[in-house]
Amino acid sequence: MKVLAINCGSSTLKFQLFEALAGPAEGAGQRLAGGLIDRFGSQGTVAFSAASGETFKEDAAIPDHGEGVRRVLDWLNACRLLMPDGLAAVGHRVVQGADRFVEPTMLDDAVIDAIQALSDLAPLHNGPSLQAIRAARAAGVPMVAVFDTAFHRTLPARAFTYALPHDLAEKHRIRRYGFHGLAHRYMAERYAALTGTQAAPGRLITLQLGNGCSAAAIAGGRAADTSMGFTPLEGLIMGTRSGDVDPSVVSYLVRKENTTADEIESWLNRRSGLLGVSGTSRDMRELLERERQGDARAALAVDMFCYRIRKYLGAYLAVLGGAEAIVFGGGIGEHAAEVRARICAGLEWCGLTLDPQRNAAIVGTEGRISADDARIHAHVLPVNEEAIIVRDTLSCLRQNPQR
């Protein structure tokens, strides 16, 4: 049976098509095709490829994620990749499920309405996912939502509760939900598989570092803490998001700039982070090059990025009482060896020592980058969220055969 995984970011759409394993067997099965649509609205790029050799690339102005899904389905049909039996199911990553959706869930009108109602908690993400979900209905097959927040449902109260008046927090469901759950779960599960620790997984700190960034403390395969909170804005410095900031900054800027809180929130999400500090780019590759050319603001942005992550590493080592390994994932984590080295610099005191040659050699592939005698190991594990989406979609279908 063929299952399509659709993974919407705020300005991207990734997909993978799998020939899924039938029955209760674990795993997503054989990958048949995949691709990326990058930058919706204008000056976007499309890059699709199939395991059988078909490829499609173009520059295109695709207006939204709904049209992106239509492009994906049209290409899969044109390449006859859905033949002979057609598509069996579609799985969608949805960023915010809050405390309502903590398991993979069959999509129907009521669930779609509930996801819409949660959009205020993930303003950059739930909307694009809903566009994709509505467009994918044209395939006429069962669909499943897999929620990023679900992995963090095991956070203890001391980690997910904000120090706010209890009645207000309860009334408005204000708590730390955590995000990037599929990525952190993948890194934890893949690390356990590679090291043979599935039966007794240890203490890990996972770092999902891309345009969006987050850290997670994981004990026994379960989330103990994570850097993102009520929305994906909290925590690490990101491409365009500020990460941790004094909340008084919002009201201060409202007064000083004579604007609204919504506008300031938009600035914190879209104009801050690496882009805001550097004034030039959110792309780590470009910032590293600018730093080499003497750009002081680019250098500061990179330094702040690494410093904030190092602070969280120290905090999560305290939360976990030490760790077996640090795992890097995401576009920056998987490809930027220099950034990995700068994050880990100065952490020899806790037993984290990188091997410079190993670190430089691992670019976009799996591998250990720590020294042989390191007490805390470091690994790079390219994240495959789509494989998790397919596995969870199959599990949900098995539990709901009548759907």
Image (cartoon, rainbow, N blue to C red):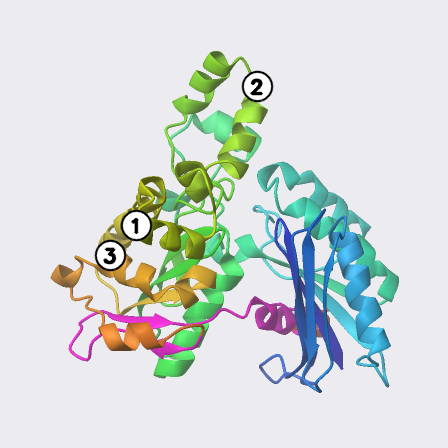
Tag 2–tag 3 contact (CB < 8 Å): no
User: Which label belongs to residue 386?
Assistant: none
Q: Is residue 194 left or right of residue 91?
A: left
Secondary element type, mark 2: loop
Magenta span includes 367: yes
Secondary element type, mark 1: helix
- Tell me which label, 2 or 3, sits earlier in the chain: 2
- The region drawn magenta spans 365-394
Q: Quadrant of the C terminus?
A: bottom right
Q: Name above or below for residue 36 compared with residue 99.
A: below
Q: Could you classify mark 2 by the number of other residues whose Cα lies within 10 Å: few (under 14), some (14-19), or many (20 or more)?
A: some
- Tell me which label, 1 or 3, sits earlier in the chain: 1
Q: Quadrant of the N terminus?
A: bottom right
Q: Which residue is mark 1?
A: 312
Q: Which residue is mark 3?
A: 317
Three-letter amino acid code at the position of disc 3: Leu
Quick one: 98 or 6, which is closer to the camera?
6
- Tell me which label, 2 or 1, sits earlier in the chain: 2
Three-letter amino acid code at the position of disc 1: Tyr
Magenta span includes 287: no
User: Looking at this rendering, what residue extends furthest in the front direction?
Assistant: 293
Residue drawn 62% across and 36% down? 120
Three-letter amino acid code at the position of disc 2: Thr
Q: Position of residue 29 (x, y in %)?
A: 63, 83
Q: Position of residue 207 (x, y in %)?
A: 39, 59
Q: Which residue is mark 2?
A: 260
Q: Is residue 290 visible?
A: yes
Gap in angstroms between the C-alphas marked 2 and 1? 31 Å
Q: Is residue 242 left or right of residue 10?
A: left
